[in-house]
Image (spheres, helix red, strand yellow):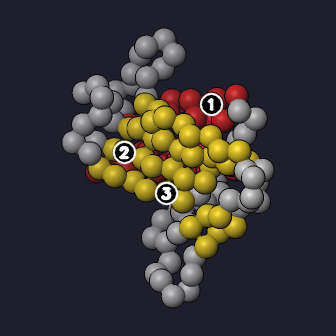
Amino acid sequence: MTSKAHNPASIGAPIGAYVHGLETPPNARLLHVSGQVGIADDGSVPPDAEGQARIVWRNIEAILESAGMDIGDIVKMTAYLTDPADLAAYGSVRTAVLGDFRPTSTLVFVSALVKPELKVEVEVVAARA
């Protein structure tokens, strides 16, 4: 997709792997993906944030693919982590999936997710012209 990044020089540069704004082309199809958690298709949950993050991103990629989209179509993502100590593990998986691609992004630390064993949840919005 040909989204246009907006990182104005009049504000501070992004402090991580994201852009401040991302403009989608006119008439783009939008896909809103519910928060994905680290529950495998067999119902198991890895005990660590890295394992859960791998499942989260695998799920997101599958949902995007089912809509004829891919990672490069993500325009907004929000990640929720339950422990700041898991940031590096989550970040390494995110980087492995996104590479140099930079969507808009928010990361929030929360006290809990829907099940106590869950450590990572990610929701995305994708757009394709």
Picture layout, residue 10 above or below residue 61: below
The alpha-carbon separation of the residues under discs 2 and 3 comes to 11 Å
**Residue shown at 65% from the left, 44% from the top:** 30
Sequence-first tag of 3 and 1: 1
Residue 109 is situated, as x and y percent measured from the top left of the image, at: 29, 50
Asked whether the beta carbons under mark 1 and mark 2 sit within 8 Å of each other, the answer is no
Indicate left or right for 122 with 57 as reference: left
Amino acid bearing label 1: Ile
Q: Which of the numbered marks, if any, corresponds to residue 4?
A: none
Q: 54 or 107: which is nearer to us?
A: 107
- The reply to whether residue 24 is visible in this rendering is yes
Which residue in the protein does label 1 denote?
63
Q: Which x, y percent locates residue 46?
A: 39, 25
Which residue carries the number 3 mark? 105
**First in residue order: circle 1 vs circle 2:** 1
Q: Mark 2 highlights which residue?
A: 80
Amino acid identity at mark 2: Tyr
* Place of residue 34 in the rendered image (x, y in percent of width and height, measured from the top left): 49, 35
Left or right of 90 in this view: 71 = right
